[in-house]
Amino acid sequence: MLEPVHPWRLIDDGQEHPRVDLLIIGCGNILRGDDAAGPVLIRRLWESGPVPDRIRIADGGTSGMGVAFEMRHADRVLIIDASRTGAEPGTLFAVPGDIVAELPPAGAMGSHDFRWDHAIAFGRWLLGPLMPDDIDVLLIEGGSFAFGDPLSPVVDTAIERALEIVRQRIASLAESGDD
Amino acid sequence: MSSTVDLHVSPLGRVEGDLDVRVTIEDGVVTDAWTQAMMFRGFETILRGKDMRAGLIMTPRICGICGGSHLYKACYALDTAFQTFVPHNATLVRNIGQAVETLQSIPRYFYAIFAIDLTHEKYKASPLYEEACRRFSAYVGTSYQPGVVLSQKPVEIYAIFGGQWPHSSFMVPGGIMGAPTLSDVTRSHAILDNWKNAWLEKQWLGCTVDRWLENKTWEDILAWVEESDAHRNSDCGFFIRYALDIGLDTYGQGWGNYIAAGTYFDPASYDRPTIEGRNDALVVRSGVYANGSHHEYDQARVSEDVAHSFYRGDDVVHPFDGEQNAIDPELGAKQDKYSFAKAPRYDVPGVGRLPLEAGPLARQVVAGKPQTKDFQDYDPLFTDVMAQKGPSVLVRQLARMHEAAKYYKLVKNWLNQIDLHGSFFAEPTDPVSARGYGGTEAARGALQDWIVIEDGKIANYNVITPSAWNIGPRDKDAVVGPIEKALIGAPVYDLEDPVELGHVTRSFDACLVCTVHAYDGKTGREMSSFVINNMC
């Protein structure tokens, strides 16, 4: 009979995995208007030139559970996503991960309703002591989430502002690494 | 005294209720059912007028779970339209990508979505109930944990070849982007072996992959369960014993007619992909099984009805000509329309248009068709299981889990065949006007694209997903769709908590369009202290 083991022990396959100082993940569905903000930001960051070696950028898309697994090899995580909180479109929120983490309903596991806010809570279950405790979330309030809509101009502008914040974060990390 | 009630449920328990089910229950048994997809999936409309390669970027975004399958068939649709040459190495890597996504889905679906319902208190009279709870409870179950955690392993291989999973676009007409190295291949072997050792053999089978694959009949499976404690107490052995005890073999039958588009290609047989040459090049074969007979699959026999779907337009429309003129659901309801899914049908020679079930059971039924080529999968197991047991929730699950062993062996074999010094891409010439068709088997069934290219742009695009086959509503002749049919006859013991409807619906692993993933857990007011620009 199999005995219970901690999930984070199960995940160890004995392989070497490079660690990163910072994992930047953009989440959202690019087919749905302003929900594309996270992946679009990642795309613009990637197109604007290389990021330092110990920083990894990823397009999390709509795979919430994938985000949880990605966090395993990072010391810090920055998640970028669109929000639909009722605020003015284009509003930027910088939120500590703790504030928004929430376990998904059991039946939604592995389904389309599994988002990164679930992923943070799920990641604690999955990764236990391996879970990075420095998780920040940058939210960009969207206006339209209809199928096939383009980005709203105000969200497009907010993505550029968010990009500045992300670049500052990368720069300050690179500086502290030089010490 | 008989009693009749109408019940509306969201058996998949989704926040936005994108699949709702309405059933009529008489004396505790479902007598009629309506599956209602309540969200418009408009990606075909988005693709019209776009660059002809846009399907490679857009369709993998349809789904955060089977994005790799979307890429695979979108790419073959272009290969047939472009008349490409696909180097053998590229075919192998594409096969590997498609298969590892399915290998991920098998345990993740089973533990995270299906098996948690097996802990329902309805079953507490079963002598195996406590053990089921110990194993399958969400988050804490002793089998749930390794099942969910290790499910990620196969798609680590996808990320090695494709850069990332699930939304990669590394498959392109003429091959794949990038060329793997020796360390990519050896690492992939190691990851797959780890998954096979730690989950498939240790946890699921309690025996070697090869021992399991010796089972050729239902009697073999029953004998296998009793052969040793290791088999009996494996998750597979336990699931079979428990499912038989709680009657999962007694309902959820459906039509008993099946479609497989087939997937994975023999590299030498499909280096010049065409629609006509496709069937003979498939490793996991295509086919239609209807009213007890096998038929060759022909995409030209597929059509869709909108008589009960929230669209304007004609019925019996082939996907090359399909349109998505959505109408207001409230208006549609007055015309007896009730779903945003269309109703796909297949014109079976000599029989007529039928609704067909897609998925692993369909694939395994088709795998029993007499073999045509050496490299093609022939497997008689489910021909016998169906003859002995007929379809049910249990048999659908067994077919799905059986594929873990089969596809593991295929991936190992393909990894061994990659020639690291060979070519992975051959530049194609863009057509001005062309038609293409690409199909695959996502974990949950036949997934196919039809593309019409005119003047170098997409003139029309159509995706028929496995869930469209399965959750599709009534057609123009009011014939119910596969899940509707499977729900009819299901027992419902507790109207307040109809777990049986969840078992049936989930046994199809229905996967709907990805919804908005924007964060809406808290209101803007609650979040106001975190605003960092001056918008509000």
Image: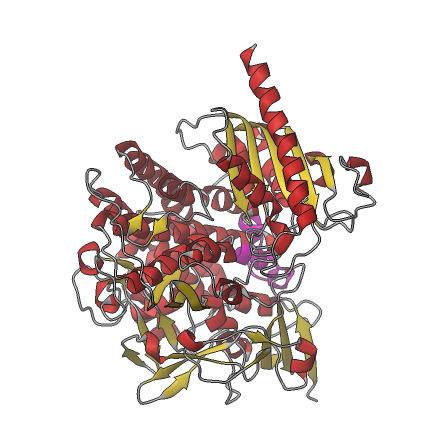
User: Could you say where residue B33 lies in the image, as x and y percent from the top left?
Assistant: 59, 79
Whether residue A18 is situated above or below residue B39 in the rendered picture? above
Left or right side of B210 for B163: right
Look at the image and say whether residue B353 sits in the magenta stretch. Answer: no
Instruction: Say which residue appears at 30% left-offset and 74% top-offset.
Output: B297
Look at the image and say whether residue B122 sits in the magenta stretch. Answer: yes
Q: Quadrant of residue B530?
A: top right
User: Could you say where residue A53 lies in the image, as x and y percent from the top left?
Assistant: 47, 24
Task: Tell which residue pokes out farthest to the top in this image.
Answer: A179
Whether residue B283 is situated above or below residue B298 in the rendered picture? above
Q: How many marks?
A: 0
Q: What colouring method underlies this structural image?
A: secondary structure
* Main secondary structure of the magenta stretch: helix
Instruction: Say which residue appears at 54% left-offset and 78% top-offset.
Output: B473
| B224 vs B459, nearest the viewer | B459
Whether residue B495 is situated above or below residue B76 in the rendered picture? below
Q: Quadrant of residue B181?
A: top left
User: Could you say where residue A104 lies in the image, as x and y percent from the top left?
Assistant: 65, 49
Left or right side of B207 for A104: right
User: Could you say where residue B504 lies in the image, as x and y percent from the top left?
Assistant: 53, 69
Task: Tell me if I can see residue B446 in this picture.
Answer: no
Task: Tell me if I can see residue B494 in this picture.
Answer: yes
Left or right side of B76 for B332: right
Quadrant of the drawing holding the N terminus of chain B: bottom right
Whether residue B291 is situated above or below residue A8 in the rendered picture? below
Region in magenta: B113-137
| B460 vs B455, nearest the viewer | B455
Quadrant of the drawing holding the C terminus of chain B: top right
| A93 vs B157, nearest the viewer | A93
